[in-house]
Image (cartoon, rainbow, N blue to C red):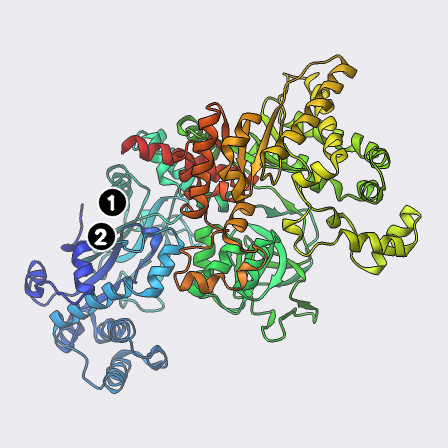
């Protein structure tokens, strides 16, 4: 291939340069001949991890300026020299960029001003020795790569802390001449969709035009509005360019973007980098490479970062609804989300702990905000563009992001956003961000689910053919179940029934049950809830026909279903025909000092058994009804917050009795499985006592982490960043599973449980279940499946496949 003379420096060499150990500069320069003009380009281990920018025209000095003035003209030579001085000053000597940006003259005057500014700021003359220039450039780029900021940015994209950087030293090709000359880039696929499409741009410098002048003619590779294309200007070079780029795709086994120059009609290839791509494009490219026989399917699966699927899967604002636009900015990362306005990363983490969606609002983000960005549903910044910190990180983690929203007034002290029309939005108000269009909308806009194309479905099918651990979804509503099924979940691993009782039609009978004085009155109130609960389960079973559905019995304390203010007490008193004083006393009596460790979960089932009796009956009657239309269902019933074997025995006895009664009443037989949600350390430690009485153990790592650490997940965000920064914890244990502490409890429970019951099914159903690291732990511990939110199901499927492939290849 027509590549200019090039010397590549390895990761190891660059690391040594950063440490101050320079290579033999004479030997490095020898291949380039006398007085070369060079460029240094970065070549990181993974292009998506970024790196320092290329530095051009190294070797430019007073002598070369005089020579180029004769060959190219003084203005062109001065511009080349001046731009090198500016680049060297800012990126190598680390001088104030404002000083050089203020130089607005061109030609020899601008060059003289730039050299004078350098000498004034650096207190030394601009270096004239090409060897010293090159050494300084190499040292600067190597140290920039290993700096703290660059490392944090890489790690946010999944790079290891010691990720390598290579540097490529290359002879300059200007793309200037009497014949057709210029420079550009080309790629054969769309960076947005990954579909075949020749795209790129070519900057023509032919017919004696000055190099790099602002009025140089920009020409797209395909015909533009003027009807001009590179193919017409230089047909032979264009044909070779397409052939070389296709050859790069085949030999380098990746879709590549080629940087090229043309001098007097002759083609030079300067660089080849992997095509930048959205998650959608990454999936399409990997699948097409596999289908074309360039890479095997297993490698295609390894080419897609599981977390990047979040971008592909994010929802969009419904195009048919009216938009209440607050302002607009740069659409930096696609997708849409709504949530409460928060102004700090700590607030964002606190919202995430409470499972409340939030929009992180900042003037601009920095590496210190990364944790809050992970916790938020979307990011809005006042400043920045497509390459700003917020934009880069947002795209990297698949988070909707709008930057540069300058028509909105940000007041971080008063914690408000003021729209151009004067409306003021405070912290806690709900807004919607459309990262696809750049719109910021008032309120919670109607969203539509992401579309999944054929390439995505094909990749997921390949994943399912490789992975060796099941993936279910946490789904509480029919809508969640539909979404879970669409995303390929093998069933529902956690259905939280408490969400079904908060609808207005159900809340009143639920409260009547809470206020009942005896078992008979409680049953009477629950009789009204039974048909509603049964209908819920019938719909879930029909949606998930043929798949397992695991239903957790009521978990939260009863006071959560009661109003907490006087107005609510009055409404409840009216609904129940009771004095307000009686309602207030009952609400106060049900209050607890620490409700999350109070009368909730199985403790409700033991002390108010009528609730679980009603739920069990609803499940069994729904099982019979849903089985009429399809294959027989085997529902799974999960007891929450267990800490003792006797709790399981008491609940199991009543559930078995309800099952027997339903069989007798209906004349229909059915099967079901009873299990325990392991959320307390004691349940994990006593798993050998509990296992003989159940079919499965499902680990609720949210509460288990909370109890193991003695941390409130609602409050930990206030200090967690400080703890992580000081190395107390390697990561927020509510974000990433603690495989040492909590993980040891999981392993103890798994080993002891299966020792007493070998066929015991094990699963993880906390939000950790969607993390690739947690899935790896569960595979190693012999778990049968993980369960996570519906949107994370494809992430988990792909992550599980990648883990199986890594094990296979060793």
Judge by depth and name the residue closer to the eye, 112 or 540: 540
- Tag count in the figure? 2
**Residue under label 1:** 236
Judge by depth and name the residue closer to the eye, 528 or 461: 528
Q: Is residue 666 left or right of residue 782?
A: right
Q: Is residue 91 left or right of residue 749?
A: left
Residue 454, placed above or below residue 78: above
How far across and how far down the image is residue 418, in percent? 65, 70
Seen from this angle, which residue lies furthest top?
667
Q: Secondary structure at mark 1?
A: helix
Q: Secondary structure at mark 2?
A: loop
The residue sitting at 70% across, 42% down in the picture is 499
How far across and how far down the image is residue 213, in percent? 31, 69
How far across and how far down the image is residue 65, in percent? 17, 75
Give the label on residue 265, or none. Answer: 2
Q: Earlier in the sequence, mark 2 or mark 1?
A: 1
- Mark 2 crowd level (few <14, some 14–19, many ≥20, 10 Å Cα): many
Judge by depth and name the residue closer to the eye, 603 or 799: 603
- Mark 1 crowd level (few <14, some 14–19, many ≥20, 10 Å Cα): some
Judge by depth and name the residue closer to the eye, 241 or 466: 466
The reply to whether discs 2 and 1 touch (Cβ–Cβ < 8 Å) is yes
Quadrant placement of the N terminus: top left
The residue sitting at 33% across, 60% down in the picture is 151
How far across and how far down the image is residue 298, in percent? 34, 31
Is residue 489 visible from the viewing direction of this image?
no
């Amino acid at each position: 291939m027509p590549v200019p003379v090039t010397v590549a420096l390895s990761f190891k060499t660059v690391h040594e340069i950063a440490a101050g150990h320079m290579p033999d500069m004479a030997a490095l320069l020898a291949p380039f001949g006398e007085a070369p003009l060079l460029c240094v380009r970065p070549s990181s281990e993974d292009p998506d991890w970024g790196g320092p920018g290329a530095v051009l025209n190294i070797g430019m000095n007073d002598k070369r300026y005089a020579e180029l003035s004769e060959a190219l003209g003084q203005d062109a030579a001065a511009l080349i020299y001046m731009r090198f001085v500016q680049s060297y000053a800012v990126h190598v000597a680390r001088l104030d960029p404002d000083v050089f940006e203020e130089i607005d003259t061109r030609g020899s005057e601008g060059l003289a001003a730039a050299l004078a500014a350098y000498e004034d700021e650096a207190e030394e003359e601009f270096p004239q020795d090409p060897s010293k220039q090159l050494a300084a450039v190499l040292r600067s780029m190597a140290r920039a790569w290993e700096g703290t900021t660059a490392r944090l940015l890489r790690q946010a994209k999944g790079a290891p802390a010691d990720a390598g950087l290579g540097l490529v030293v290359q002879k300059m090709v200007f793309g200037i001449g009497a014949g057709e000359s210029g420079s550009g880039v080309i790629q054969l696929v769309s960076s947005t969709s990954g579909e075949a499409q020749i795209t790129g741009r070519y900057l023509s410098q032919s017919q004696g035009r000055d190099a790099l002048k602002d009025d140089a003619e920009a020409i797209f590779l395909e015909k533009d509005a003027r009807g001009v294309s590179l193919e017409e200007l230089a047909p032979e070079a264009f044909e070779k360019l397409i052939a070389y780029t296709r050859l790069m795709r085949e030999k380098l086994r990746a879709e590549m973007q080629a940087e090229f120059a043309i001098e007097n009609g002759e083609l030079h290839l300067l660089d080849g980098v992997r095509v930048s791509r959205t998650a959608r494009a990454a999936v399409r490219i990997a699948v097409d490479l596999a289908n074309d026989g360039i890479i095997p399917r297993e490698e295609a699966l390894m080419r897609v970062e599981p977390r990047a699927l979040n971008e592909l899967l994010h929802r969009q604002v419904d195009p048919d609804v009216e938009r209440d636009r607050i302002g607009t900015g740069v659409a930096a990362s696609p997708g849409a989300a709504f949530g409460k306005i928060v102004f700090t990363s700590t607030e964002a983490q606190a919202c995430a702990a409470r499972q409340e969606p939030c929009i992180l609002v900042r003037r601009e983000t920095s590496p210190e905000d990364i944790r809050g960005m992970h916790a938020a549903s979307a990011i809005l910044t006042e400043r920045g563009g497509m390459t700003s910190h917020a934009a880069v990180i947002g795209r990297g983690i698949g988070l909707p992001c709008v930057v540069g929203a300058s028509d909105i007034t940000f007041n971080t002290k008063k914690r408000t956003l003021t729209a151009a029309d004067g409306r003021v939005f405070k912290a806690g108000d709900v807004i919607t961000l459309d990262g696809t269009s750049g719109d910021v909308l008032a309120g919670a806009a109607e969203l539509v689910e992401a579309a999944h194309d054929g390439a995505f479905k094909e990749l997921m099918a390949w994943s399912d053919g490789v992975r060796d651990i099941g993936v279910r979804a946490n789904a509480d509503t029919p809508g969640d179940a539909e979404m879970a099924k669409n995303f390929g979940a093998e069933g529902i691993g956690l259905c939280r029934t408490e969400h079904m009782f908060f609808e207005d039609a159900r809340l009143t009978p639920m409260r009547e049950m809470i206020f009942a004085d005896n078992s008979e009155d409680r049953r009477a109130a629950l009789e009204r809830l039974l048909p509603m609960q049964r209908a819920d389960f019938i719909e879930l079973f029909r949606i998930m026909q043929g798949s397992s559905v695991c239903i957790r019995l009521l978990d939260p304390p009863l006071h959560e279903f009661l109003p907490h203010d006087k107005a609510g007490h009055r409404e409840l008193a009216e609904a129940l025909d009771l004095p307000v004083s009686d309602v207030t006393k009952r609400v106060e009596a049900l209050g607890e000092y620490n409700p999350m460790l109070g009368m909730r979960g199985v403790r409700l089932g033991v002390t108010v058994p009528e609730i679980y009796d009603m739920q069990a009956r609803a499940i069994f009657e729904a099982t019979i009804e849903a089985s009429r239309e399809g294959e027989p269902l085997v529902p799974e019933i999960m007891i929450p917050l267990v800490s003792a074997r006797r709790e399981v025995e008491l609940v199991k006895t009543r559930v078995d009795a309800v099952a027997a009664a339903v069989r007798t009443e209906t004349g229909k037989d059915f099967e079901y499985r009873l299990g325990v949600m392991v959320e307390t350390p004691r349940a994990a430690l006593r798993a050998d006592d509990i296992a003989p009485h159940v079919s499965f153990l499902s680990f609720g790592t949210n509460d288990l982490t909370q109890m193991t650490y003695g941390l409130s997940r609602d409050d930990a965000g206030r200090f967690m960043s400080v703890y992580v920064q000081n190395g107390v914890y390697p990561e927020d244990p509510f974000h990433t599973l603690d495989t040492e502490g909590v993980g040891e409890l999981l392993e103890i429970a798994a080993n002891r449980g299966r020792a007493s019951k070998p066929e015991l099914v094990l699963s993880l159903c906390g939000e950790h279940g969607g993390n690739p690291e947690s899935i790896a732990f569960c595979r190693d511990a012999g778990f049968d499946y993980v369960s996570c939110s519906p949107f994370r199901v494809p992430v988990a499927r792909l992550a599980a496949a990648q883990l199986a492939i890594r094990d296979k290849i060793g």
